[in-house]
Image (cartoon, rainbow, N blue to C red):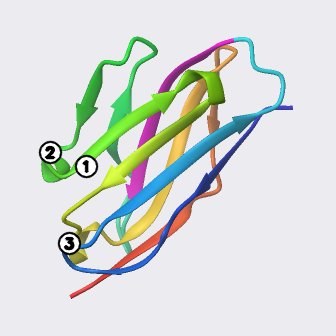
């Protein structure tokens, strides 16, 4: 059974940094795109960044220049490096991934940015 597990969230002051990880486990034949979503309090889940199997990346306008998505295929892990954090970056961060042609979601990790 395939699982995705996020880690790396926490409480940080504005201007600080965090690195989120999204690790896939189980029987994995193929790992295609990996994406990070954010759900802010009272808002819908929204795409933050995505990386394809070939390494192409897309970012939400609000995080361009501050966040970097990457992946380590040997470890079946995706990362989100978040620099210059702002209070509006606060929310639960979820990763998803296309694994063995199926879409999987992680359980989410809380990121809180204080002013």
Q: Residue at x 47, y 54 (%)?
A: 20
Residue 102, by quadrant, is top right
Give the spatial CA distance, label 2 vs label 3. Answer: 13 Å
Instruction: Give the residue number, with chain letter if any, for mark 1.
Output: 67
Measure the alpha-carbon separation of dots 2 and 1.
Answer: 6 Å
Image vertical order of residue 109 relative to residue 90, above or below: above
Q: Residue at x 25, y 30 (%)?
A: 58
Residue beneath the point at 57% across and 44% down: 22
Label drawn at residue 86: 3
Is mark 2 in CB contact (under 8 Å) with mark 1?
yes
Calculate the distance from the C-alpha at mark 3 to the C-alpha at mark 1: 11 Å
First-in-chain label (2 vs 3):
2
Residue 111: x %, y % from top left? 43, 71
In the image, the segment drawn in magenta is: 30-38
In the image, residue 31 above or below residue 67? above
Q: Would you say the magenta stretch is mainly helix, strand or loop?
A: strand
Mark 2: give few (<14), some (14-19) or many (20+) Cα within 10 Å. few
What residue would you read off at disc 2? Answer: 64
Q: Which image quadrant for residue 113?
A: bottom left
Q: Residue at x 51, y 37 (%)?
A: 78
Circles 2 and 3: CB distance less than 8 Å?
no
The magenta stretch spans residue 32: yes
Dot 2 falls on a residue whose secondary structure is loop
Left or right: residue 6 compared with residue 51: right
């Amino acid at each position: 059974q395939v699982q995705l597990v996020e880690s790396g969230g926490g409480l940080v002051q504005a201007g600080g940094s965090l690195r989120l990880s999204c690790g896939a486990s189980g029987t994995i034949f193929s790992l295609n795109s990996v994406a990070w979503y954010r759900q802010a309090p009272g808002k819908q889940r929204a795409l933050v960044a995505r990386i394809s199997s070939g390494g192409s990346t897309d970012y939400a306008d609000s995080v361009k220049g501050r966040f970097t998505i990457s992946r380590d295929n040997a470890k079946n892990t995706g990362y989100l490096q978040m620099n210059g954090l702002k209070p509006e970056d606060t929310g639960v961060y979820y990763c998803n991934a296309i694994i063995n042609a199926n879409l999987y979601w992680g359980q989410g990790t809380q990121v809180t940015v204080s002013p």
